[in-house]
Image: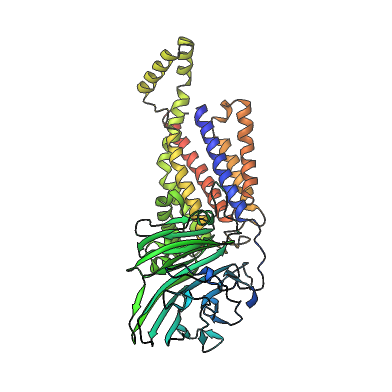
Amino acid sequence: MESQRNLLLIGLLFVSFLLFQQWQLDQQPQPEPVAQTQQDVPAASSADVPATAAAIPSAAASVSTNQITVSTDTLTLSIDTNGGDIVAASLPEHKVEQDGEQALTILSAQYIAQSGLIGAQGPDGQAQRPQYQTTAKSFTMEGEQLVVPLSYTDANGIVFEKRFTFHKGQYDVAVEYIVRNGSNQNAQVQMYSQLKQTTNVEEGSMFMPTYRGGAYSTADTRYEKYSFDDIADDNLNEMTQGGWVAMLQHYFVSAWVPAANSNNEIYSRNVGNYAIIGVKQPSQVIAAGATATMKADFYVGPKDQEALSALSETLNLVVDYGWLWFLAEPLYALLIFLHGLVGNWGLAIIAMTLIIRGIMYPLTKAQYTSMAKMRNLQPKMQELKERFGDDRQRMSQATMELYQKEKVNPMGGCFPMLLQFPIFISFYWVLLESVELRHAPFFGWIQDLSAQDPFYVLPVLMGISMFAMQKLQPTMANMDPMQQKIMQYLPVMFTVFFLWFPSGLVLYWLVGNLVAIAQQLIIYKSLEKQGLK
């Protein structure tokens, strides 16, 4: 019994420490958004362009003052006509603060999405990147689709049209190159797409980090993180059919998804204080007078699993549930289903908690039954100690015989408890990774389930519920004074920790405690009927 209590205490303290570490990281103040001007955008440089067989000059182009703005219902982008890079992106439907007016910025001066054509006739493989022409300085979506065309003609008469196609309600952009070879010889070009971000960002802790960095997928590796440190240490060079590259942050992601049926090259580079991860598609030879098209999809927005899966069957894995993903994924699916029924994320969390506790009720009952049987054996165990004294071998044999005779499993009170931990942790990751809970209201004073309770009501109620659970424990009276003090202070410690936890997680824990109290009362009555106290 002592080992079971110690294991429970250590497990709870360890889990609470990990959760507190993670939430503390999430609540660290982020840098204040800087009003972006055209001069803030980093220069489009040939140093950013992936190397090819041909030598790439190292001269950097000057900062472009020619940018166009694109506005849709889901995205507001700035595209630099020097190279056609996306140098800013904000999400009108996602605000920096709940009920605020400022749209959340994903791409900015220190984080941009680049694409271009390299190769012998590729305009981006030269000393200066192409200066595209466009029909307007700003574009606004008015229907279901918006096409933004950029055009550049080189000295040999090759016309390069770069199209950005947007669709209503979507965060993905189709980036397409249409090359019309007006020269008198073959043209060889190769499309690349990459993400460039400063490495001066917080990546999280060693325990349960909120990851910010690169990631990629290949035919052999469905999902792999590639941190800024990895990029600095070693350049990626992976050949694969399909695949994708991405930059991740909490709740949001940007990603390039090339053609799924082509053999692509995943690569990374480190340029100064910037990390680059990208993908090259196969080189194409365009005959004189012919036309060729190359395309990649760009996504910038929330980690919406349905939208991400529509672009690639593995892109939804950027919603990272860790090694317990096989438990977290069905829990997430159930949470989405419940929200569809009740229409409120707080009520969905409550319903999810009731279902989880209901499923685990047989384990909980088995745990308390085993503990009750072990307590009833204490007089006989004391007799064995008096009989065999310090003879550990004979004591051990006699103890096992007693267990077999009374049909008691000494691990029965411990094993069910250990099985519950993975479910609890998995659900925690679901709550942490689900962008749907960001700024999601519950009722009353709880208007953001991803933020802490502003009046600390839920944490206090959670602490009271833990105290009530302790009072119901029949083993408290049998503990030594030191253990009793530790257990008495445990609700206080948890209450303090949970003051900074997201209210959605505290709600889950509070409801779980209330259900556990009800289950304890039911189980104790059942045990008393069986003669087990």
Give the residue at x 48% y 21%: 378
- Judge whether residue 216 can be spotted in this image: yes
Give the colouring mode of the picture: rainbow
Q: Looking at the picture, how far across and down is residue 323, in whole percent?
A: 44, 48
Considering only vertical position in the picture, is 463 above or below 243? above
Give the residue at x 35% y 21%: 405
Considering only vertical position in the picture, is 149 above or below 456? below
Residue sitting nearer the eye, 434 or 152: 152
Residue sitting nearer the eye, 332 or 413: 332
Residue sitting nearer the eye, 104 or 190: 190
Q: Looking at the picture, how far across and down is residue 191, in whole percent?
A: 42, 73
Q: Looking at the picture, how far across and down is residue 434, in whole percent?
A: 50, 59
Q: How many labels does the image show?
A: 0
Q: Looking at the picture, how far across and down is residue 110, in whole percent?
A: 60, 67
Considering only vertical position in the picture, is 101 above or below 331? below
Name the residue furthest bottom. Answer: 135
Considering only vertical position in the picture, is 235 above or below 91? above
Residue sitting nearer the eye, 315 or 482: 315
Q: Is residue 194 left or right of residue 178?
A: right
- Judge whether residue 37 can be spotted in this image: no
Give the residue at x 56% y 85%: 138
